[in-house]
Each structure stands twice: as C-alpha cells, then as structure tokens.
Amino acid sequence: MLGKKVLNHYYWHCSLTTSQDSVVRERVAQAEALANVQADKDYNIIKYPSNGQYMSLLSYTDFLDFSFPALAYSYRVDLLTGRVEKRNYHTSFNPPILHRKELMLSADHPRQAEYRELTQAAEQLGLFDNPVTIGFQKNWETLIAASGFQLLNGQFVALGNQVDGDAADPIETATVSRHLTALSRNNLSAPMQCLARHGFLDGSLSVFDYGCGRGDDIRNLSVNQINVSGWDPHYAPDNPKYPADIVNLGFVINVIEDIQERIEALAGAYHLSQRLLVVSAMLVNQNAYKGQTFNDGVLTQRGTFQKYFNQTELKGFLEDVLDREAIPVAPGIFYVFKDADAEQRFLLGRQRSTRNLFMPKRVLRLSARPMMPGAPKISRSEQRHQLHQILIEPLWQQALMLGRLPEKNEIANPLALTEAFASVNKSLRYLLEHAEPPLLEQARQNRINDLLTYFALQAFSRRKPYKHLDNTLQNDIKAFFGDYPQAISQAQAELFQLGKSERITVACQQAAEQGLGHLDMEAALHVHSSQVNDLPVPLRIYIGCATVLYGDVEQADLLKIHSQSGKLSLMRYDDFVGQPLPRLLERVKINLREQTFDLYQYGEDYEPTYLYFKSRFINEESTNYAEQAYFDEQIQALGLFDFSGYGPKPNEFRETLANARWAIDGFHLVRSQTIPDIDSPCGRYLSYRQLLECGETQHATGLANLPKQPDSYTALYELATHILDPVIDYFGMIRLTYGFCSHELGKHIKHRVAPKLDQHAAHEHNSKGNLICPRLGAAADFIVEDENMREVANWMAANTPFDRLYFYGEDRPLHVSFGPELKGDYIEMVVTESGRLVPKKNFKLIMPENK
C-alpha cells in the first residue's frame, strides 16, 4: 500500500487514492459518502487502518505550502456502523501537525525534493529522535527552539543572539493554589485541597483548623508560608482558639455523638471565622451500616462514633444552625461565607471560562526592543510604544478577563495611565489600536457565557438585589445585557430550555466537535472536569444544577452527561493525569429530575476497573496527551483485546498483556523483562517447552536448554505468533524438529550449524558476554506431516513476515526465522556432488510486499 505507515495505519495524500488497490478505493469512497465530504476540498489526507473499521479523513491547512501543516478538521468514520465524528481544531492551542510529507505523495511530485530535504534536515538535528511527542504544534516548536534553530520559509535556520524581542515569554497560568494542590495532593486533607483549588490558600488569608487532629494540615500549610494555627480537644487542647479569615471544621461534627455538642462545635467554629467556614463530614456509603446503632449514628468496630450524613441532610443541618446558605463544593464539603461579597465573587468565579483567551503569541509585549550599535533610530511613536508597554499589557490582560474594556473605577493604576497618555480614555483608545479584535470578541462571548451560567444558577439560591451586586458585576450587566432584568430573563430562558433533551444532545455534539469530550454511541458526552467551563452554556448550566445538589464537580475527573435521561455521572480515578490506565475509585450518578444521587466506591469489595483509551476523553492541550494517544494506539495495534462495552476486566487485561510479553512502563508499552513458566502458552498453539525441548541433541543430552535472557522468550513468542500460528491455522499442527538453542546446548552440536547466523540462539550470550547471533530474533525448523513442504514454504513466503526461510526439500523440515531485519529472504538449499548444502543460485520468490 502506498503512503506513510505508522503502527497500524497508512497515511497518504488524496491524490494517491487513485493509485491504491480497488478495495481501498471503494472504502475511501464509502467514507467520503458517509462524511459527505470531497477530496481536496474538505480533506486532503487519508488515515487508513490496516486492520480495523475506523478511517479518518483529515484536512490540513495549506498542506503543500506549510512545512509542517496543522490539522484543521478531522472526520473519523466507522465503516461498519456509518457513524461519523467530526472534530474542529481551529481553536486548539496545540493542534496535531504533519511530518514527512514526501512519504504521502507520489514519487514524481514536483516538490518531492524540497520535502525530502526538509525531512533530512530535521533528522540531522535529531528532531525525530523521540517521535511520540513531536506530532503536536507546541511540542514541535519548543523542540526546534531547544535545538538552537528556527523554521523560516521552509528551512531550519540557526539562531544567533536573540535581539529582536519577538519571542515573547509564555504566559504563566499556574497559581499558588495549583502548586499547593499538586505538591500536597497526598498530604493535604480534602477540605484543604478544595481551598487550594479555589485560590484561598495563596498566603493572603489566615487559616484556623478547628479540630486539627495531629496537625498534618497545619504542618503542610506552614511550610508553604501560610498563616495557620489550630486546636484539637485531644491532641492540642491547650492551644488558643484564634479568629481567622478561614476556619476549617474538617470531619469533626460526624464524630461527635452528642447532638448538642455537635451544634456547639459548628457554632463555635463559625464564630471564629471572619470570611469563610469550611465544613466537611462523612457521607453515606456502603460502609455506613457496618457497626452498632448509637444515637443518630453508629459505633464502629474500633469503638469510634460516626454520623453518616447525606448531602441534603448535611446542607440542611448547617443552614438550620447557622442561618446562612451552605454552598456544596464537593461531596460532604460545604462553604459557609460570612463575607457576602466574598461569597458572590466565589460563585461568579466558579463560572469563569478562560479557554483560548491568552494566545501563545501575545499582541502586546512587555520587553522593549533593544537598540543595536549602528542601527537606524526608531521613530518617536515607536519609542512611545515601547515606553507604554508595561502599562498597556496589564490593561490588555484585564480586558481579556472582563471581555470588555475596563471602566475607570476598575483600573488599578489610573494615575500612571493619565501621566503617560494624558487621560485614561486615551490609554484605552491606544489599547484598542494595538489589540486583536477577534481575540477581544472571543473574550466577550466567553464572559457572556460565564454570566448566563451564573445568573441561571442563581435561581437555586437567594438572588442578590442589583444594588448589592459587586461593582464589576454591575458593569458587566450594563455592557452585555443592558439591565439586570434582561440578564435574568436571558439566563432563565437558558435554564428552562434544559428540559428539552434535544437541546442537550445538540450541545453535546457541538462540544465534541470542539474537542471538549468524547461522544459515545448513546449520545452521552464524557468530558474532563477541567473543561466544564469551556462547554456550551446549556451544558454548563446542566452541570451547575448538579453542583447545587452534589457540590464541586472538580472533585471528579470525568463527567458523563446523559443527554436523554436527565442524569449526570461523575467518575473519580486513581491518578487520572499520571496513569495511562487510571483505575476507577468512585462513581456518582446524579438524577437531576428526582434530585437524588447514588455513590459507588471501588476498592476491596469491588475491583477498580481500568479506563481504556483515555486520550478520547482529553484533548491535545491536556498534560501527557501525546504520550497517552501513542500509548492508546499501541494497545489498539496489538489486536489482543475486545474493547467493546467497558473493555476487558483488569485481571484479564493484565494476564493477556503478560502472556504476549508486554509490560507497561509509565506511558510506554515495553517488552516484558520477566522469565515465564516454560509450560505457559507461546502463541495460540504451542508452549515455550515445545520450542525448547524439540531437537535431537536436546533429547539425547537431556539439557534443560533454558534461555537466560527475557528477550529470548519474547523472540520465541514473536516467532510463534507471526509465523507458526498462521501456518498451523492454515495447514494444521506442525512437528518441531529444532527450536531454541542455548549456549550450553550449542556446545554439543558440532556439524552443519552456523550459530552466528541461524538465529536459533535468539538473544543469548556466549561465555564472553557477547551475542551468539547478532541477527537476534528466533528460529525454528519444522515439518507438516502429509504436506508438500514446497507448498508450505510458498504459502509462508506469500502470507507471513519472516526474516529468512530455507527450503531443503519437499519432504524435509524447513527453517524459518523472525527477527528485526525482516528481510524476507526465501532460499532453496541444494546438495552439491561433494555433499555440501548450498543455496541455489538465482532462486528468489518475490513476496507481495516487495513487488
């Protein structure tokens, strides 16, 4: 097949389709009809499966003229079911890109030489040394820059000293809270992690841990320069109870068996809080009924008391005692604000979307262009532009956050702007002259979506009068809606539309097309929690309704939006980001119509299942996406598993992978370095023992003939699965006459052998530690009873990928090897008058793939 082969797929330009096999042409035409697209108009590259049902038609921007074109659209077509998945990459920060274009075009294409030279230059720079991550734009550009080069007009040009200032520093999006979350994920308690994630642990607010236990949270927060203290009736009873901005009552009220003391503890903690009280308690789960009933809870086997709340009960208890609204932020974790403005900012902040606001290359730069010796003088307007950068850049970032130009009362440095530009209004006009209108318009629409979501969800709480709204929020209402009633009306219209399942279905399709989640066969959208605020407004409100009942969905990793049933499922995994096959730990199914949810936890009683093909549920802007996508393609290419439904059970998956001599190392699929039981399967029909104990000399000596190198077992497995299994499938069982030969066994074989060439020693070493056969791989001699061995050899030459195949006669065993070279040499051996075996001259059966 023509084109570039990557794992189990071929890639070629649509101009090559007419040169492909007729079956391939028919399948491409079928995919075009299903996707309703035309070659060279709607797509230009075909991704064709060598074994599978999914074909992709890809549209790369300016394929011929861009050195490494970026993907603009993709159409993934299921040829069996007729399902088409469209993806739009125009808003992606990190779209897939294409390399080695020359392999996808005909050999006589007029620009072949140009593309080959570009590929050769990239190879010389070592840019293709790690092919896993280079298939995405940001990774590729970073790699080129790190190599000391830049790509200009289709050529790699060495970088000199950076003097033009055009390469702006990337925008730093990490915050202190994110750093704390990542740093202390396994150390901070769940309530503290919530505070960190929502930006309350940036060091500006004091924290008091009411019921601090052994003080683990206090210790961890202290090392991060946070003003923190605590009290505990058992471990720190003498510590004073200090008022603080934030008070944490973490898993305290659920261990107090006396209801009145429980109320007093809650009221006492709230009294100490100056801005925010965080309350957490245990929720009902399958362990809630293990123990002896006591008061309104249970006594556990250890003699401790536990009161298991449900989410609604806990919310009601907090609000009854404190007479304040309790905001769920996670299962069993609530925020109760004392500061009304802080509460309002928090609720609005939860709805903020920032996707695609900050482009990698900023329009306005912080650094001024340095003057070079002998360079012409720059104009006064350019000097003024440079002097004003440090003032305009923060203003531009604020405009992107607000989705509009800031009002005077929102600007942090009006005096500096007035001094530099004569007035604030002139500074805003200057900003518009140097801004990107499309980017500001995108920010505007994002902000409107944030506000619609916010106002829609306010229907479930005490709506604030306009005069009590935050000043910035009042300005937003004027700018985007005109007045408060109009904003409420539009938001309520969005909320009331959620009852129409077709609206949710369409929104799910739109999200999937933008790379926000995976749409399954039941039209349910699976999306990562980090992408919730980038979803279409109907889905954000749909999920927001669940937060009213359940809490902060960011506690989960994946969300499943059931577009037809009014349900939302939340799944939490063990290290979702860091594992290629994360295990399911907890699943929550929320029924929005009935206002209930069910909690399922996995562990000892219920084995955590694997999440297969994680790359479907994230996108190219996610951490480890390139490695994950390649890992998923490798797993798929093995062809070992049935991934229909939820895929194989964990034990079945691990056993099958181990039997096939594969292991998982991080995000890499690597060959196993274990020694298997020799009676375990080696392929579908044979065992390792059969390949180790099949030769005359082995039988005569009784030597164990065991490989010492794990790679030798892998080579035998590869020989069995690629060569011997297909032969047995077609001709029936074979009789092995010679298989693996260890270094010890080889000492007993003196005649007519070539251990350095025949590959029977696989990957074994001699007494000096050198490879016995540098060709590697593995070999076996066998015969098929009652078959003409020439017919067997000819069939193998046409249907199996061997390294070397030696034919000795129609009724004699033949020798075959499978190794890294895969040369496909088919050689007939004849006996000379002197009795020597030599290859027959001019004999070579040309295999189909070599034509």
Image (cartoon, rainbow, N blue to C red):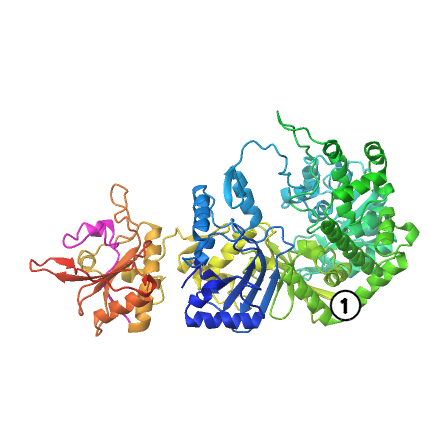
Q: Position of residue 250 (x, y in %)?
A: 74, 48
Q: Which residues are magenta?
A: 733-760
Placement of the C terminus among the 4 image quadrants: bottom left
Dominant secondary structure (helix, strand or loop) of the stretch shown in magenta: loop
Q: Position of residue 452 (x, y in %)?
A: 80, 58
Placement of the N terminus among the 4 image quadrants: bottom left
Q: Position of residue 147 (x, y in %)?
A: 50, 39
The answer to which image quadrant residue 180 occupies is: top right
At 7% from the left and 60% from the top, the residue drawn is 833
Q: Along the line of sight, which residue is nearer the eye, 218 or 767?
A: 767
Residue occupied by mark 1? 498
Asked whether residue 753 is drawn in magenta, I would say yes
The answer to which image quadrant residue 71 occupies is: bottom right
Q: Is residue 725 left or right of residue 758?
A: right
Q: Is residue 470 left or right of residue 224?
A: right
**What secondary structure is found at the residue carrying circle 1?**
helix
Q: Along the line of sight, which residue is nearer the eye, 595 or 479?
A: 479
Q: Position of residue 709 (x, y in %)?
A: 33, 49
